[in-house]
Image (cartoon, helix red, strand yellow):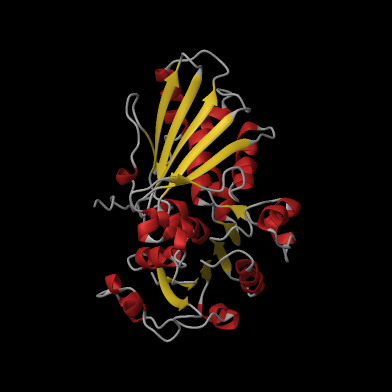
């Protein structure tokens, strides 16, 4: 069976780099276009020596051109910033292509919410209603029929997967939810910044954007769907002195009397057919190193009877599960392939 030709707009960021790594060995997709305004003319092998020996290394990076992408590709991944992504998406959709957007341009259903949090006008608000939120555990059937998939943010992926079963089953209160999340430095992107220099990150730990992180409305939108009622979340991100990985510790209030064993049973039932969610047995907690470079989301459950809190700990790799791997899973569904194609990945142990 011939492979489906795909394109990647924005190959020089961390998410573009990760997508190139995954596409190099994908059984059903062939990367035929990789674009970058700053690195056009170079081969992928020049940019990323780790691709040496793979056919993908010979691809010459080109300037992004919608007409060229439209004639060469069937699916295009957009690994570019918000605002830029919406324009590419519209042009490519008009040419009949399928698009997986890794930016935030189509994650929020409400135009006013997007424009408030991202301080920019949405040029194609009609696409907000047709775009499908790309969290496969929750929307796989819709993703399979979609032309435009909004790839979730990394923090929201860890938090939504951690909270959804408890909210859907009325186990916890919809108020007073606190998500305390920590991310590796790659979550800030590859663009040079003083805040993510080695000497600024190494041997330190800090909070940032408390109460105003742009992933907040995305988290609240999807958790409100799970809870079947509008809710707010106190989302508090922190920067870890590691390169990749997210760990979210989520504090909730129990609504009913329960036991650790029954909560564990509820979660394992919720995710029994989901290959990438691993609910850890009682007494075990997740670690970022165990999911590094994979599609896994590891979830730990701690019931604190003294405070009547259920503490949910969720960890993912922000670049793979939280971005590029998830985008590839969505493309698998859109193309009619098994969701796990090319994504049965063992952890990248240090």
Spot occupied by residue 259 in the image (x, y as percentages of width and height): 44, 15
Q: Nearer the viewer, residue 245 or 124?
A: 245
Q: Nearer the viewer, residue 224 or 204?
A: 204
Quick check: 113 left or right of 50?
right
**Residue pictured at 59% horizontal, 36% vertical:** 234
Q: Is residue 261 above or below residue 210?
A: above
In the picture, residue 342 is in which quadrant? Answer: bottom left
Find the residue positioned furthest to the bottom.
41
The reply to whether residue 163 is in sight is yes
What residue is shown at x 75% (from left), y 53% (from top)? 112
Which residue appears at 59% of the width and 82% of the height? 67
173 sits left or right of 273 in the view: right
Q: Is residue 137 visible?
A: no
Residue 309: image x %, image y %?
50, 21
Q: Is residue 291 rendered to the left or right of residue 33?
A: left
Considering depth in this image, is 1 or 135 the residue closer to the camera?
135
Q: Position of residue 35 (x, y in %)?
A: 48, 77
- Across the whole image, how many numbered discs are drawn on residues? 0
On-image quarter of the N terminus: bottom left
Quadrant of res 115: bottom right
Residue 148 occupies quadrant: bottom right
- Image position, residue 64 (x, y; %): 54, 80
Q: Nearer the viewer, residue 67 or 339?
A: 67
Which residue is painted at 64% across and 46% down in the image?
217
Q: Is residue 156 above or below residue 151?
A: above
């Amino acid at each position: 069976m011939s492979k489906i030709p795909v394109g990647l707009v924005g190959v020089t960021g961390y998410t573009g780099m990760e997508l190139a790594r995954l596409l190099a060995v994908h059984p059903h997709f062939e990367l035929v276009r990789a674009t970058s305004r700053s690195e056009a003319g170079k081969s992928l092998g020049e940019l990323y020596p780790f691709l040496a020996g793979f056919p993908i290394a010979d691809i010459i990076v080109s300037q992004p051109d919608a007409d060229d992408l439209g004639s060469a590709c069937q699916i295009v991944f957009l690994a570019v910033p918000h605002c830029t992504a919406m324009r590419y998406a519209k042009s490519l959709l008009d040419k009949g292509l399928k698009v997986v957007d890794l930016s935030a341009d189509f994650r929020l259903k409400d135009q006013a919410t997007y424009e408030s949090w991202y301080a920019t006008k949405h040029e194609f608000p009609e696409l907000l209603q047709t775009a499908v939120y790309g969290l496969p555990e929750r929307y796989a059937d819709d993703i399979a029929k979609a032309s435009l998939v909004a790839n979730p943010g990394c923090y929201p992926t860890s938090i939504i997967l951690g909270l959804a079963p408890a909210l859907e089953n009325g186990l916890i209160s919809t108020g007073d939810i606190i998500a305390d999340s920590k991310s590796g430095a790659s979550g800030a992107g590859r663009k040079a910044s003083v805040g993510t220099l080695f000497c600024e990150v190494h041997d330190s730990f800090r909070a940032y954007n408390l109460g105003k992180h742009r992933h907040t409305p995305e988290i609240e939108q999807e958790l409100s769907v799970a809870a079947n009622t509008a809710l707010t979340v106190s989302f508090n991100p922190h920067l870890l002195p590691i390169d990749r990985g997210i760990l979210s510790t989520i504090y909730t209030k129990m609504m009913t009397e329960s036991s650790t064993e029954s909560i564990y049973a509820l979660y394992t039932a919720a995710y029994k057919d989901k290959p990438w969610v691993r609910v850890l047995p009682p007494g075990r907690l997740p670690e970022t190193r165990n999911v590094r470079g994979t599609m896994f989301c590891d979830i730990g459950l701690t019931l604190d009877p003294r405070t009547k809190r259920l503490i949910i700990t969720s960890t993912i790799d922000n670049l793979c599960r939280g971005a590029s791997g998830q985008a590839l899973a969505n493309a698998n569904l859109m193309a009619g392939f098994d969701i796990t194609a090319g994504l049965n990945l063992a952890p990248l142990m240090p």
